[in-house]
Image (cartoon, rainbow, N blue to C red):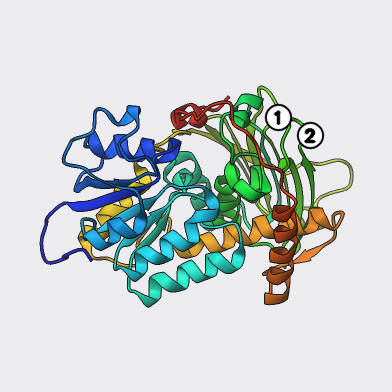
Amino acid sequence: MLDTSSTAPVRIGIIGLGSAGMLHAQALSDGLVPGAILSAVVSRSGSFPEPTAPFSSEIAHFETLEALLEASVCDAVIVATPHLMHPAQTIAAFAAGCHVLCEKPASIRLSDAREMAASALQHDCHYSLNYNRRVVPLYRRLRELVHTGKIGEMRRVHWTSTSWLRVQSYFDTSPWRGTWAGEGGGLLVNQWPHILDLWQWICGMPTRLQAHCAFGRHHNIEVEDEVHIYAEYGRGATVTLVGSTGEAPGSERIEIVGSRGSIISEGNQLTITTLEMPVEEYIASAQPGFPRPETRVETEMLDAEGDLVTGITRDFVNVLQSKTPGSLIAPGADGVNGVMLANAVLLSAWADGSWIELPLDTAAGAEFDRLLAEKIAGSKPRTARESTIFSLTDSFRKP
């Protein structure tokens, strides 16, 4: 456990040296996270893979998480292994007194996400998720505008997020990708955890949804690579979302309509249109004919990329050193909502677009677990052509 009485650097261990783990390791080794040092890594190989050559020889190497935790060389760990391994590894780290920054998603199953959040509380550990879009100025401003009522009460949202193009070789060079047994899902658990998180972070959680997914439409894979969602809120607002890993060039566009105007987010620009009075009042009081309410249009140019590599890690380390629990930008408990949305979408898709009520209750969660277990049992193993570590910075590029 971190000694909060001193100002010593936070010692961080990285679990998994795939693409995400290497990105974290390089950032820590390059000193891009003030107040933190990379003290250890866990990888299945008996030595560092070739890309780790620039790392200090003082970094301890372990082949298992258990060995790292027994050595007591870390105050915190970054869990950067395949999705299905996150729950057990995160909970084991908490039990050993380590704080955890976990890669997205927290888990595949809602039951696991809830257990992870409960374990952090039980062991009095800090727990964050790498929802790195929360540090992007564009999304932070969008959330602020919605939450402060700039456009009144939310009425309608249309969200297109199709800039996640993946080519077939992306799947073919990693045996766990694109399979139920290896990933537990596709777009929803690999690329779209960011979008599901931003959706509930900006707009709140819906009360029910229905969804349609295409499984292997654009790629030779088992899991979903296209998603269409329609959701409703208690006060009548609706949200539609469209996502794909098979479109080019793809787009990232958000339109939020409220009772007093609208916000459109596209590229690095927010276009904010406001009305002098709520639209309901205008409809009721306007003179006959085809009048239109007076509007005011503002545009804001904002950074749409942000510090996607180290932003959440910096926040995590700052909270550990400042001893301010509850102030994390992306607390692990928030991961429950993202996993719940992903589970609900698949439940609806597997039931031909049936309505799914939210929040998911214990029975719905158990049904998801049962259906996923069936998918995993029937999953076909994939033979990778070669083991490849991708540069995730390429994934951050948007049209």
Secondary element at tag 2: loop
Q: Is residue 378 above or below residue 245?
A: below
User: Is 228 on the left-hand or right-hand side of 333?
Assistant: right
Q: Quadrant of the C terminus?
A: top right
Whether pointer 2 and pointer 1 mark residues with C-beta atoms closer than 8 Å, the reply is yes
Instruction: Please name the residue shown 44% across and 33% down the image.
Output: 303
Residue 226 coordinates in the image, percent (x, y):
74, 39
Q: Is residue 125 above or below residue 81?
A: below
Which residue sits furthest front?
46
Residue 282 coordinates in the image, percent (x, y):
76, 53
Instruction: Please name the residue shown 51% across and 71% down the image.
Output: 115
Nearest the eye: 75 or 331: 75
Nearest the eye: 284 or 316: 316
Mark 2 packing: few (<14 Cα in 10 Å), some, or many (20+)?
A: some
Mark closer to the chain start, 2 or 1: 2
Label placed on residue 7? none
Disc 2 target residue: 217
Mark 1 packing: few (<14 Cα in 10 Å), some, or many (20+)?
A: many
Q: Is residue 247 above or below residue 227?
A: above
Nearest the eye: 396 or 65: 65
How far apart are labels 2 and 1 at the CA level?
8 Å
Instruction: Please name the residue shown 67% across and 41% down the image.
Output: 381
Q: Amino acid at mark 1?
A: Gly
Label placed on residue 246? 1
Secondary element at tag 1: loop
Q: Is residue 148 visible?
A: no
User: Is 237 on the left-hand or right-hand side of 19?
Assistant: right
Q: Amino acid at mark 2?
A: Arg
Residue 224 coordinates in the image, percent (x, y):
72, 43
Which residue sits furthest top?
249
